[in-house]
Amino acid sequence: MSEPYQPRIIITTAGFGEGHNSAANNLASALESEAEVEVVDPCDRGSPNLNQQLRRFYRFVTTHTPKLWSRIYKSTERHDFSKERFPLMRKPENILHDLLFSFSPDAIISTYPLYPYFLDRSFRRGASKVPVFTVITDSIEINAAWSKAPTDFWLVTDDLTKKKLVAKGLPAEKIIVTGFAVHPRFQTLTPLTSQVSCTPFKVLYFPTSKKPTVRKHLRAILDVPGNQTQVTVVLGRNVRKLYERAREIQEQYPGRVQIKGWTRKVPELLSSHHLTIGKAGGATVHEAIAAQCPMLISHLVPGQEQGNLDLLHDIGAGQLCDTEEQMTSAITQMLANDAREWRTMKDNLAASAMPCGSATAAQFILKQIRSES
């Protein structure tokens, strides 16, 4: 008996922020048993040196001058991406065009807003037309680059985002609520319940690369009255830059600080901690929601990340704390009266979490491909 046909799927991504790559790789994991998948970053493959420079610029501006990035981001609302006006994007567009012929996909998933415009031009240049699924990695406040993309379906993170897009004139039947494409492992994990002990109160902290804030934020967490907080700080790619500062705090608060560099255990860490603190990126916020882990936002890029914060507010599971005083106060309030506020946040998240986002998206996409064949 012959093996059942496995559809061929291209997933396009980009390295500007963690959300695009995270969603792309998680979708690939969810699809790999039922499809032949190629994950590609056309920007990196087409212009690797320039792409690295642009990524470094993006990280610097969003970390150190977020208001400047907000102006840049908002200016794209007025841009018509259907017209080929970016010489810098010519090589990435041609890379993707050539891949349509060499890989012969049955469908294309885009986790970055510009690629559907590239694909539309490729289809008009003679590439075989196949379904395009645009996976929006932001929430609620959606840039026009996403909403105007020439695509067959938009896959979104939540009902509020769908309502916003419908209000902009997008057809409701083309907007599919799947949840963010978090790693499939989230489905197998058991989060802390709202009834667990909060002594010690375990906080998972993801710092940005800004050196001065690491010690300030760690002290703000550890100085909560009662000395019941413990911190796991995940330094990631900033380990060389930030380790000595984190180590200094670890020595000042013996037995209360654990330092990690790069880790693949983020789902497990989120599921085993009471609270997470970090920037309002799409992947970070939605992973916290999937793990039912309340979140404090320590760094917000206005405009681009505002919708992720709004989603936390709407669920009743987090808030912005961009000063040390706000951070200490927020945790203190959470823990008052036998952690009543924290327990309410946990119950809110239990009712809202979608840990199966990548699997839901994968099954929808496969169903559409099969209906086309």
Image (cartoon, grey):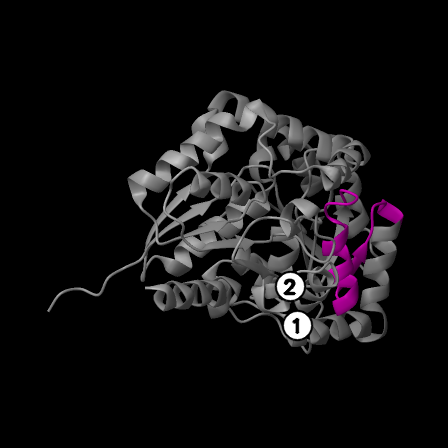
Q: Which residues are magenta?
A: 300-325
- Left or right? Give the position of 36 relative to 257: left
Q: Position of residue 282 (x, y in %)?
A: 64, 51
Task: Give the mark nearer the N terminus: 1 vs 2.
Answer: 2
- Residue indicated by mark 1: 352
Label 2 sits on what residue type? Ile
Task: Residue at 49% x, 58% y: name it.
Answer: 183
Q: Quadrant of the C terminus?
A: bottom left
Residue at 74% from the left image edge and 42% from the top image edge: 77
Residue 310, visible in the rendered structure: yes
In the rendered image, residue 316, in percent from the top left (x then y), is placed at: 78, 68
Q: Which residue is mark 2?
A: 289
Location of residue 71 (image quadrant): top right
The quadrant the N terminus occupies is bottom left
Gap in Å between the C-alphas at discs 1 and 2? 8 Å
Q: Give the structural element (helix, strand or loop) at label 1.
A: helix
Residue 280: say if magenta. no
Circle 2 Cα neighbour tier, 10 Å, few/some/many (<14 / 14–19 / ≥20): many
Whether residue 52 is visible, yes or no, is no
1 and 2 marks in contact (CB < 8 Å): yes
Residue 196 relative to residue 265: left or right: right
Disc 1 marks a residue whose amino acid type is Ser
